[in-house]
């Protein structure tokens, strides 16, 4: 089956495109410069409304701050009785809440903006808001509601003269049809949106529309039309240097050639996709292209090259997903971690057995007492033995309870462990400010292929045991290890004010330990360099699983921390803008500028130097 490029770049493209068509392109630099004017407080009336709108729209680093600007815009618009800016306030707040993941609140804001747009006969505003609601329902997998609101948006936008917004709505509807395998309807939507993009000469929209049509034609069995559309999409993306989309469509085109049994063309096309992905650092595309080449060489009986590319596919696939970097290592390491929790369960079962044995013993003593009343001496001996048994049993129970609690605290935070023991479950908890750290060993995959699982576990445990000691020193919380990746957090389960600073101190000690370990005891273990990435923001924390469970955290903050690690360098600590703002007065940092991050766009990053004396 041909991979579908639409689901990767196209939906994201039009989510951003819609906002840019509604107002302007988002720019954090604009928000930063306007913030000074805002704090000055001298603007009034419509000028202040426009200032708040710009601040709410362009603030992309801090969703809470953006929502604060939107709230003030809503309040001031009501006082000024200005429906245009009141609509924009609700729309912007809904958009930011959608990006933040608060989908129900986003829907409420969009409904409010629709009512205001209807009152003021703002048809374009009403149409794009219906489209935003449909996008939310699509994310929530409520397909019927998504279709309903896409239809409403398109019905209204057809009456306007804004072809780009109509094209965006049609493309998003086509996306929804494609996700639900309604290929004929999807093709019809993309055909119409493509014509509109061509009329407006919007190259990116044209390219992704015809590329999606190529995907659909292939799934319908029309390889000729699939080839024509995919080639056209690639030609359109080349001048605007959208190499991610080009790399994806080249894989799709390779599938077409493979179906046509044009093996040389299929291999050449897949090789070009791999070259673009390697040049631009697209790890997921490197994995996909390598897998494609492995399959093609295998079908052409070139098993050595097939194996070579398959190994590359596995290496980059595991690098992207951070799951099972080495299967044997992951199994051994996972068993090592969860065995601690299983021990607690076994101890609790043992405690129950001891209690049952105690009850049976008491019954036995009672029967003996009734039958042998005349044997006072034997009764005394029996009571003495009973006393000694209870004393030993209680000592065992206390010892096992203590051991069980210690094992539980090795897996879960103290507060979480107490809640689990008291209620048998743990309520998920949201923390507004948490610092998350990821580490990753450089060149680990290459070493892993040539070592036994036992040696890998020994090597990784050598580092992770020291990392455990370091985070305990700074009162941080270990979350989990995944393959050769180590993850910890600060600021939970109890909120603290200096978790970002402590996390960086811990990261520096980790780097120092890794550096020293390369010098000392070189003959005993394989040594690595590491990358470290850190981000600060809100997370949700809780227990996953019902038996072999573990404490984990979720949220956009975690994803960005992982991106900080993947964009770091060997022996470096790479931190986000959020973390830098918390530690800049206590640390020297090197600004790396804005770096393109997959699915995130431009993000500011900093290398940590050292603490100031």
Image: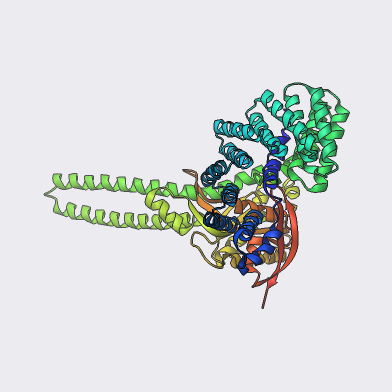
Q: Residue at x 28, y 48 (%)?
A: 358
Q: Residue furthest top?
A: 221
Q: Residue at x 47, y 55 (%)?
A: 407
Q: Residue furthest bottom?
A: 613
Q: Position of residue 143 (x, y in %)?
A: 57, 32
Residue sitting nearer the eye, 119 or 99: 119
Residue sitting nearer the eye, 89 or 533: 89
The quarter holding residue 415 reads bottom left
Residue sitting nearer the eye, 444 or 416: 416
Q: Quadrant of the C terminus?
A: bottom right
435 relative to 307 in the view: left or right: left
Q: Quadrant of the N terminus?
A: top right
Disc tally is 0
The quarter holding residue 43 reads bottom right
Q: Position of residue 179 (x, y in %)?
A: 64, 31
Is residue 24 at all visible to an observer of this figure? Answer: yes
Q: Is residue 468 above or below residue 177?
A: below
Q: Residue at x 68, y 49 (%)?
A: 23
Q: Is residue 21 above or below residue 219?
A: below
Q: How is the image coloured?
A: rainbow
54 relative to 420 in the view: left or right: right
Q: Is residue 192 above or below residue 425?
A: above
Q: Position of residue 238 (x, y in %)?
A: 85, 41
Q: Position of residue 319 (x, y in %)?
A: 70, 47
Is residue 569 at all visible to an observer of this figure? Answer: no
């Amino acid at each position: 089956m041909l991979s579908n490029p639409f689901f990767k770049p196209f939906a994201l493209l039009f989510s951003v495109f819609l906002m840019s068509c509604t107002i302007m392109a988002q720019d954090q630099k604009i928000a930063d410069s306007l913030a000074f004017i805002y704090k000055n407080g001298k603007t009034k009336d419509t000028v202040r409304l426009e200032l708040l709108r710009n601040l709410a729209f362009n603030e992309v680093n801090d969703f809470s701050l953006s929502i604060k600007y939107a709230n003030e815009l809503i309040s001031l618009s009501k006082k000024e009785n200005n429906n245009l800016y009141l609509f924009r306030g609700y729309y912007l707040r809904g958009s930011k809440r959608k990006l933040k993941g608060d989908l129900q609140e986003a829907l409420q804001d969009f409904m409010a903006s629709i009512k205001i747009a209807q009152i003021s006969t703002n048809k374009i505003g009403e149409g794009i808001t219906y489209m935003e609601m449909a996008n939310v329902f699509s994310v929530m997998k409520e397909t019927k509601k998504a279709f309903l609101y896409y239809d409403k948006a398109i019905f209204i936008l057809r009456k306007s003269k804004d072809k780009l917004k109509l094209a965006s709505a049609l493309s998003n509807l086509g996306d929804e049809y494609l996700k639900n395998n309604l290929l004929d309807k999807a093709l019809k939507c993309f055909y119409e949106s493509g014509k509109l993009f061509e009329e407006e000469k919007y190259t990116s929209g044209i390219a992704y529309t015809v590329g999606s049509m190529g995907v659909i034609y292939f799934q319908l069995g029309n390889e000729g039309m699939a080839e024509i559309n995919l080639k056209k999409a690639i030609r359109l993306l080349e001048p605007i240097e959208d190499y991610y989309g080009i790399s994806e469509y080249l894989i799709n085109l390779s599938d077409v050639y493979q179906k046509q049994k044009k093996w040389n063309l299929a291999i050449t096309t897949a090789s070009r996709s791999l070259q673009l992905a390697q040049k631009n650092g697209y790890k997921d595309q490197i994995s996909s292209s390598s897998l494609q080449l492995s399959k093609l060489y295998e079908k052409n009986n070139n098993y050595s090259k097939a194996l070579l590319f398959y190994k590359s596919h596995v290496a980059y696939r595991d690098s992207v997903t951070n799951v099972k970097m080495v299967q044997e290592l992951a199994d051994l390491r996972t068993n090592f971690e969860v065995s601690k929790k299983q021990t607690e369960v076994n101890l609790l079962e043992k405690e129950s057995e001891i209690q049952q044995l105690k009850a049976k013993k008491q019954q036995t003593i009672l029967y003996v007492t009734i039958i042998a009343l005349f044997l006072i001496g034997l009764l005394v001996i029996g009571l003495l033995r009973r006393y000694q048994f209870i004393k030993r049993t209680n000592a065992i129970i206390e010892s096992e309870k203590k051991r069980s609690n210690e094992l539980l605290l090795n897996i879960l935070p103290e507060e979480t462990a107490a809640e689990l023991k008291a209620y048998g479950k743990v309520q998920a908890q949201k923390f507004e400010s948490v610092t998350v750290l990821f580490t990753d060993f450089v060149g680990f995959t290459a070493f892993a292929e040539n070592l036994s699982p036992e040696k890998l576990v020994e090597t990784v445990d050598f580092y992770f045991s020291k990392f455990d000691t370091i985070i305990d020193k700074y009162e941080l919380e270990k979350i989990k290890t995944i393959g050769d990746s180590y993850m910890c957090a600060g600021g939970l389960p109890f909120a603290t004010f200096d978790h970002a600073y402590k996390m960086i101190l811990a990261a520096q000690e980790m780097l120092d330990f890794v550096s020293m370990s390369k010098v000392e005891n070189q003959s005993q273990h394989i040594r690595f360099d590491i990358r470290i990435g850190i981000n600060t923001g809100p997370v949700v924390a809780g227990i996953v699983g019902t038996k072999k469970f573990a404490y984990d955290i979720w949220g956009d903050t975690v994803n960005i921390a992982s991106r900080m690690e993947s964009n770091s360098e060997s022996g470096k600590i790479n931190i986000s803008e959020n973390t830098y703002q918390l530690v800049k007065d206590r640390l020297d940092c090197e600004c790396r500028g804005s770096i393109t991050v997959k699915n995130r766009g431009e993000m500011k990053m900093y290398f940590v130097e050292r603490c100031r004396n």
